[in-house]
Image (cartoon, helix red, strand yellow):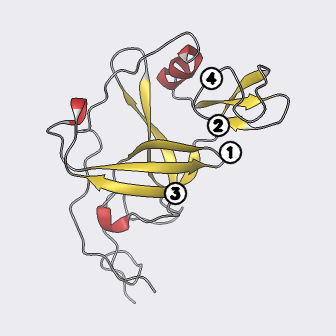
Amino acid sequence: MTRPRPSRPALPAQSLPAPPPAVNPETKPFWDATAEGRLLLKRCLDCGSVIWYPRAICPQCASLRTEWFEAAGRGCIYSYTVNHRGEGAYQGSPPFVLAYVELAEGPRVMTNIVGAQESDLDVGLPVELVFHDTGDGAALPRFQAVVPRGDTVPPGTARDPDGGSPGDPH
């Protein structure tokens, strides 16, 4: 049985820095797609492995026969931490969530979870892709919690410990 977590303020989404990535010829198609709001992954044509991070060689079988494909942009939190002390571009930022998200296609990617309250975060929480523009021709893929259809609770709004929306009759 899990204990209810205390309610905390929403973790800001747009106040996170969006530093431009280092783009090289091998990763350029990936970053170009992010600017269009698409997440591309690589797949090995020999063993079928889905490859993360973008690279030309398959880490499973060493094949050079790989292709890009568009990912669904959905997954679940595999692991996370709330970071209160950032470095580099994140220095001086308010607390932010650093997480591994397991994509529906299989790979686990390190990213940020945005627009959620700390008390709503949990391993296994379904998430969906959002992009934050770097202003430099690329966007950073980040994730937000999936709100089930018909649920009127906006992202970042606390739920009560019984799992309902605030103000819902029990």
Q: Which mark is residue 105?
A: 1
Dot 2 and dot 1 residues touching (CB under 8 Å): yes
Q: Position of residue 17 (x, y in %)?
A: 26, 32
| Mark 2 or 1: the one toward you | 1
Q: Secondary structure at mark 2?
A: loop
| Mark 2 or 3: the one toward you | 3
Q: Earlier in the sequence, mark 3 or mark 4?
A: 4
**Mark 1: amino acid:** Glu
Q: Position of residue 160 (x, y in %)?
A: 33, 78
Instruction: Work out which residue is located at the far bottom of the displayed protein and give it.
Output: 170
**Label 2 – label 1 distance at C-alpha:** 7 Å
**Label 2 – label 3 distance at C-alpha:** 18 Å
**Label 3 – label 4 distance at C-alpha:** 23 Å
| Mark 3 or 1: the one toward you | 3
Q: Residue at x 30, y 79 (%)?
A: 167
Quadrant into which the C terminus falls: bottom left
**Label 1 – label 4 distance at C-alpha:** 17 Å
**Mark 3: amino acid:** Tyr
**Label 3 – label 1 distance at C-alpha:** 14 Å
| Mark 3 or 4: the one toward you | 4
**Mark 2: amino acid:** Ala
Q: Is residue 36 left or right of residue 140?
A: right
Q: Is residue 146 left or right of residue 153?
A: right
Q: Which mark is residue 78?
A: 3
Q: Earlier in the sequence, mark 2 or mark 3?
A: 2
Residue at the spot of label 2: 71
Q: Earlier in the sequence, mark 2 or mark 4?
A: 4
Q: Residue at x 30, y 62 (%)?
A: 118
Dot 2 and dot 4 residues touching (CB under 8 Å): no
Crowding at dot 1, Cα within 10 Å, few <14 / some 14-19 / many 20+, comes out as some
Q: Earlier in the sequence, mark 1 or mark 4?
A: 4
Residue at the spot of label 4: 55
